[in-house]
Amino acid sequence: MPDVALHHEVLRLRTPLVTAFGELRERELLILELTGPDGVTGRGESAPLTPYDGVPVEVAAEALAVYAGILQSFDDDTPGALMLEACREAADIPVALAAVDLALWDRAGKRSGRPVATLLTDAPLDRVPVNATIGAADRAGAASAAAAAREAGYGCVKLKVGLGDDAGRVAAVRAAAGPEMHLRLDANGAWDVDEAVRMIDALSPAGLELVEEPVHGIDAIRAVRERVAVRIAMDETAGDFGALIAGGADAVCLKISRCGGISGLLAQAALVQAGGAEVYVASTFDGPLGVAAAVHVAAALRVTAACGLATLQHLDVDIPEALAVRDGAISVPTAPGLGV
C-alpha cells in the first residue's frame, strides 16, 4: 500500500510582480509525496493561483486530501493512469491533479532509472529555450531588466503590459535589449478588442514576436487576430471550453498546473498542434517541481519557441542546479524522474 504525505509551502517573490490582474507577492505550493512499498518516492506539486486559474488554495488542498485516501487504496503495481483517473473521478480539479500526475511520473522515472523526458519520447531536446519576464511598471526598471537579460544571454524577453505607460516601457525595453532580442508582450487580458487593436498597432513598430492574451475569450482573441499584423497567443483563454480547437490564435501557452500535469499538457498540446497553432510552455511562477516537469514536457514536444520557465529566480528559493538558466536556456535534468 503506497504512503502519501502532503506539505504546504509558501514562497515569497524577491520583488513583487505587477500584472493586469494585480500584484503577485508570494506563491503557495502544495507538495504531494507518494512512496511505494519499494521505498521509491515520487514528488508532485500543486500551484494554484486564484486570480489566474480561479482555484483557491483551500479547494486544491481539499482535493489533495481526497486523492491521498484514494492513492493509498492501490497496490504498488497499479498503472499510474488508473490511479490518476480514480482521483479525477473523485474531484476534477486540474491544478490539484497536477500534483498526483507529477508524483506518478517522478516515481516512474526513478523506478526505471530514466529522466521523465525520455519516458515521453525517444528524442527529447537537450535544452529548452526560455524567456526572461519583465514586470517592472516604470521605464527605468524595465530597461534595466532588459539589459540584464541581454547580458545573461536570453534571446527573448516578455514584458507585462496593460499597466500604464506601455508605450514608454516597450520603447525602453527595445532600446536596452537591442534589435536582435525577441520581444513578447503579455497583457493578461487587460484590454477590450478595440483597445487591444489600437495598442498593438501603436506598439508594433518596436518589433514584436507576439502578444499574449491581449483580451479574454475565444471570440475576442479571434477578432483581435483578424485586425492586427502581429502574431496573437492565447494563455488564460486556453482554459475555456473549446478554445484549443477553435483556431483563433497563432500560438497557445500551456501550463502544467492548468492542464492537470504532464499527461494533460501532452493531450492539450496534441489538440493545439492538430489545429495548426504553435505550442509553448510556461509556469505560473511554480516551484522547482512544476518548472522541472514543464522543462521535461517542453523537451519531449521539442518546443523551439522560448518558454516562460525562467521564473524560479523571481522566488526566494534555492534554485536547483539542474534548473539553472544558461545562455537563455534550461538544460533538461538528467537524473531519474523529474531530476530535482
Image (cartoon, helix red, strand yellow):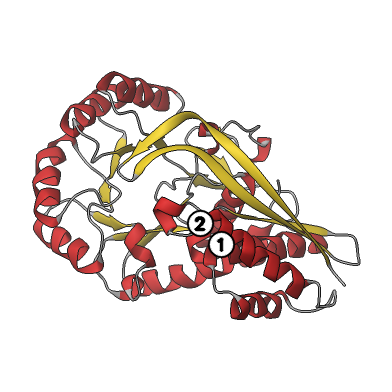
> Which percent across, then down, holds residue 227?
9, 58
The residue located at (36%, 22%) in the rendering is 147
Q: Residues within 10 Å of mark 2 (few under 14, many from 20)?
A: few
Q: Considering depth in this image, is 185 or 123 the residue closer to the camera? A: 185
**Residue 104, placed above or below residue 209:** below
Report the amino acid beneath label 2: Pro
Write the residue at 19% across / 68% down. 219
Q: Is residue 309 above or below residue 77?
A: above
For mark 2, what is the residue?
Answer: 56
Q: Quadrant of residue 93?
A: bottom right
Q: Which mark is residue 176?
A: none
Residue, disc 1: 59
Name the secondary structure under disc 1: helix
Q: Residue furthest right?
A: 38
Position of residue 135 measured from the top left corner of the image (x, y, whole percent): 36, 33
Decide if residue 46 is on the left or right side of residue 224: right
Res. 113 in view: no
- The image shows residue 228 at horizontal and vertical percentages of 12, 54
Quick check: 40 left or right of 272?
right
| Residue 268 or residue 61, whichever sits in front | 61
Marks 2 and 1, how far apart at CA: 5 Å
- Could you tell me if the residues under marks 2 and 1 are in contact, i.e. CB atoms within 8 Å? yes
Q: Residue at x 60, y 81 (%)?
A: 89
Instruction: Tell me which amino acid carries mark 1.
Output: Val
Question: Visible in this render: residue 50?
Answer: yes
Q: How many marks?
A: 2
Location of the N terminus by quadrant is bottom right
Q: In the depicted view, which residue is nearer to us: 183 or 102?
A: 102
> Within 10 angstroms of label 1, few (less than 14), some, or many (20 or more) residues?
few
